Image: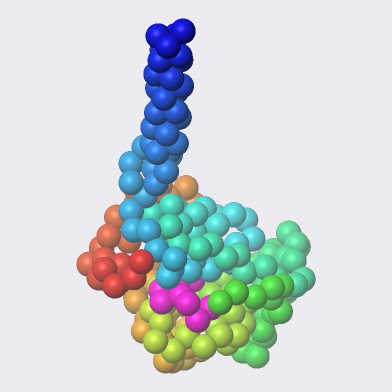
C-alpha cells in the first residue's frame, strides 16, 4: 500500500511540473517564439485609422514595445463617401479648415502615467487628419516624448509631423516615420531600435 501511494504521489508531482512548464513557456513570447522586446506600461500607442492600414502599424508597435493601444475613434464615423478626396467630401472640407476639430469618442485613462506616446495617422492631403489635432489639444503632454508615425500609399511624411509640434509645445518630439500598407513587423522593429528611438526605452518600463 505504501509503495502504491508513493508511486501515485510521484505521478501527481510530475503532472504538476509539466503544467507549470507549459504555462511558463507561453508568457512573454511573441507569435514567432521570440522576445517581444521592451516591456513597458509607460508607453501609449494612440492611432486613428479608417481603413486599418495605420492600425496594423500600431499593432506592430504594440507587439514590440508591449505598450498600451488606444484607438482614436471619431464620434461621427467616416463613411466611404467622406473619404472620396477632391470631391468636396468631409475629409476635404476638414483638411481645408484650420479650425476643424472633429470630436473624439472616449478618452485616454490615466494619461499622466505615460512617458512615451506614439501617435499614428493616415496622410490626408499631405497632413495629419484634423482629429489628430483634437487629440493633441485634449491632453497635457508636458514632459512626455511624442513619436509620430503615419501611413500613405505614396506620399511621404512631409511636414505633417512637424506641423503638430505647436499643438503640444511642451513635449519632446521625435522625428516621425511614414509606412506603406503591408509593412512588416520586422521593419517596424528596426525603426523602433533605431538610434533616435532606442534611447527612449532605456528610461521607461
Looking at the image, which residue is at 73% across and 65% down? 78
Towards the viewer: 190 or 107:
107
Please say whether residue 122 is one of the residues in the magenta stretch: yes
Question: In x, y percent, where is residue 152?
Answer: 50, 61
Towards the viewer: 137 or 125:
137
Could you tell me which quadrant the C terminus lies in? Answer: bottom left
Say how many tags the image has: 0
Task: Note whether residue 65 is visible.
Answer: yes
Please say whether residue 93 is one of the residues in the magenta stretch: no
Residue interval drawn in magenta: 111-123
On screen, residue 7 above or below 184: above
Q: Is residue 162 left or right of residue 56?
A: left
Question: In x, y percent, where is residue 79?
Answer: 75, 62
The quarter holding residue 53 reads: bottom right
Looking at the image, which residue is at 60% across and 65% down? 71
Looking at the image, which residue is at 40% across and 22% down? 14
Task: Note whether residue 133 is visible.
Answer: no
Towards the viewer: 194 or 161:
194
Q: How is the image coloured?
A: rainbow
Towards the viewer: 134 or 123:
134
The quarter holding residue 50 reads: bottom right
Question: In x, y percent, where is residue 37?
Answer: 33, 53
On screen, residue 76 above or below 142: above
Question: In x, y percent, where is residue 111?
Answer: 53, 78
On screen, residue 174 above or below 193: below
Residue at far front of view = 2
Looking at the image, which residue is at 38% across and 54% down? 64
Amino acid at each position: 500500500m505504501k509503495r502504491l501511494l508513493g508511486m501515485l504521489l510521484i505521478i501527481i508531482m510530475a503532472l504538476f511540473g509539466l503544467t507549470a512548464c507549459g504555462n511558463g513557456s507561453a508568457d512573454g513570447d511573441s507569435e514567432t517564439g521570440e522576445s517581444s522586446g521592451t516591456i513597458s506600461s509607460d508607453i501609449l500607442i494612440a492611432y486613428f485609422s479608417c481603413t486599418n492600414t495605420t492600425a496594423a502599424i500600431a499593432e506592430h508597435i504594440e507587439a514590440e514595445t508591449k505598450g498600451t493601444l488606444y484607438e482614436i475613434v471619431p464620434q461621427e464615423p467616416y463613411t466611404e463617401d467622406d473619404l472620396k478626396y477632391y470631391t468636396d467630401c468631409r475629409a476635404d472640407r476638414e483638411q481645408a479648415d484650420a479650425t476643424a476639430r472633429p470630436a473624439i469618442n472616449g478618452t485616454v485613462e490615466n494619461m499622466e502615467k505615460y512617458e512615451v506616446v506614439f501617435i499614428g495617422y493616415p496622410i490626408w492631403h499631405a497632413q495629419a487628419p484634423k482629429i489628430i489635432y483634437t487629440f493633441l489639444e485634449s491632453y497635457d503632454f508636458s514632459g512626455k516624448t511624442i513619436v509620430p508615425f503615419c501611413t500613405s500609399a505614396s506620399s511621404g511624411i512631409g511636414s505633417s509631423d512637424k506641423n503638430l509640434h505647436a499643438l503640444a509645445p511642451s513635449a519632446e518630439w521625435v522625428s516621425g516615420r511614414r509606412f506603406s500598407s503591408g509593412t512588416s513587423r520586422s521593419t517596424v522593429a528596426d525603426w523602433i531600435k533605431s538610434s533616435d528611438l532606442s534611447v527612449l526605452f532605456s528610461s521607461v518600463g
